[in-house]
Amino acid sequence: MPDKVETAASPQGDGRATRWEDHKAERRSRILEAAMEAINEDGPDVGVQQIANRADVPRSVVYRIFTDRGDLDEQLRGRIIERLMADLAPTLTPEGTVGEAIARAVETYLRWIVEYPRLHQFLGTGSPSRRTTGSRVVTGTKTAIALQLSGLLATVLDAVAGNSDLAESLAFGLVGLVDASVNRWLSNPQSPLGSDDLAEFLEVSIWQVLHGNLTRIGVTIDPSTPVSELQ
């Protein structure tokens, strides 16, 4: 009988393919981590060669793993957002009082951007030579956060007012308020506000938006109201 011909579907072929995919995934992760380190230390306009050097791979390997610099940047934004959401996501399930829940979310977010300002800048604007325009990763993340907040507010409004029509507008408005305020603060080194001042501004502003809209529909709460009473 003729020798059996190995195909891609054979166990040995599958094993080689799996090992290659694992190796490729490991290199992709190493390159993305190296890129984050480079941006955090040197600013957003780092070159592919700098990233390759940090990852200890040839520059050509970067372009075998990623289609082009645009693909690298978009996957890098995804990795940065994973890092951010690991800290931020737990605060989107509020605990304690209303005031404590607002403060916890704001302070967690600001603590992250103070620690990683260049990574946050990269998310919003990209680098000077490769501006961020319509990143699906960034837009999708902001939308996902707003939708999660919208669901939370809908639960609260249904419980205390019997009507959740305002939930989505409130959620997207609050996310826009925080995003615009933080981005401007980061881009303006002459701002007279420190991070604590900005946190206080955001906490007061978020509370006032919520309080004003709830009061308008006949709901009275204050910052000391336990979140558990609103669900």
Image (spheres, rainbow, N blue to C red):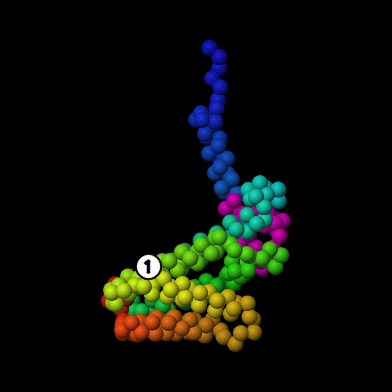
Q: Is residue 118 left or right of residue 140?
A: right
Q: Per the image, is 31 magenta?
A: yes
Residue at 57% in and 53% down: 29
Q: Quadrant of residue 104?
A: bottom left
Q: Can residue 80 be found in the magenta stretch?
A: no
Q: Residue at x 59, y 72 (%)?
A: 117
- Residue 171, compared with residue 133, is above or below; it is below
Taking the image as shown, residue 78 lies to the left or right of residue 144, namely right
* Residue range corresponding to the magenta coloring: 28-55
Tell me if residue 163 comes above or below residue 129 in the rendering.
below
* Residue 128 seen in the current view: yes
Q: Is residue 136 above or below residue 16?
A: below
Residue type at numbered disc 1:
Gly
Query: Is residue 31 shown left or right of residue 157?
Result: right
Q: Position of residue 67 (x, y in %)?
A: 65, 50
Quarter of the rendering occupied by the C terminus: bottom left
* Front-lying residue, 130 or 15: 130
The image position of residue 219, as x and y in percent, is 31, 82
Mark 1, Cα crowd under 10 Å, few <14 / some 14-19 / many 20+, is some
Q: How many marks?
A: 1
* Residue situated in front as seen by the camera: 1 or 70: 70
- Residue identified by numbered label 1: 151
- What residue is rendered at 56% in x and 35% in y? 16
